Amino acid sequence: MDNYHLFPIDVNTAPLELLLRVPGIGVTSARRIVAGRRLARLSYDSLKKTGAVMARARYFLTADGRRPYPLHDDPQQVYRCLAFKDGGGFEQLSFLEAV
């Protein structure tokens, strides 16, 4: 969440490098987005067809300046939405501590 100020981005204008920073969009999906927008403007429905995980990416994207989901002003609120799914909590393990 260090670069929260960069978001939301429009999928129809964002460069490939910035699309790769969006949670839920991998290399394959980002390339499909760039290729697809050459043919037509992308909407949220067409983003699902690229393989992007919209449950995670929706907080960071707009399509033609519109957002179907509200943007949280607090980056920690977005983190909680992404990390705590279905009421269950997740804890990031330390790389240096013994388990």
Image (cartoon, rainbow, N blue to C red):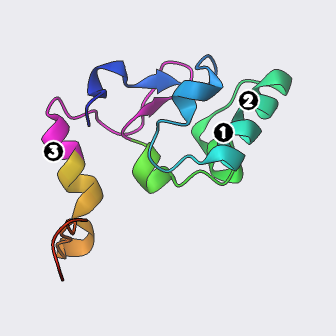
Assign the C terminus to one quadrant of the image: bottom left
Which residue matches tag 3?
77
As rendered, which of 31 and 93 lies closer to the eye?
93
Question: Regarding mark 1 in the picture, which secondary structure is present there?
Answer: helix
Which residue matches tag 1?
30
Check disc 2 and give the amino acid type.
Val
Residue 69 drawn above or below residue 50: above
Residues marked 2 and 1 touching at CB (< 8 Å): yes
Q: Does the stretch in magenta take in 61?
A: yes
Q: Provide residue 89's location: percent of width, then percent of height.
A: 17, 72
Q: Residue at x 58, y 20 (%)?
A: 14
Q: Provide residue 59's location: percent of width, then percent of height.
A: 36, 39
Look at the image and give the residue range highlighted in magenta.
Answer: 59-78
Residue 15 drawn above or below residue 49: above
Check disc 1 and give the amino acid type.
Ala
Q: Is residue 96 left or right of residue 46?
A: left
Which residue matches tag 2?
34
Q: Is residue 41 left or right of residue 35?
A: left
Q: Provide residue 21's location: percent of width, then percent of height.
A: 47, 35
Label 3 Cα neighbours within 10 Å, binned few <14 / some 14-19 / many ≥20 = few
As rendered, which of 95 and 10 lies closer to the eye?
95
Nearest to N terminus: mark 1 or mark 3: 1
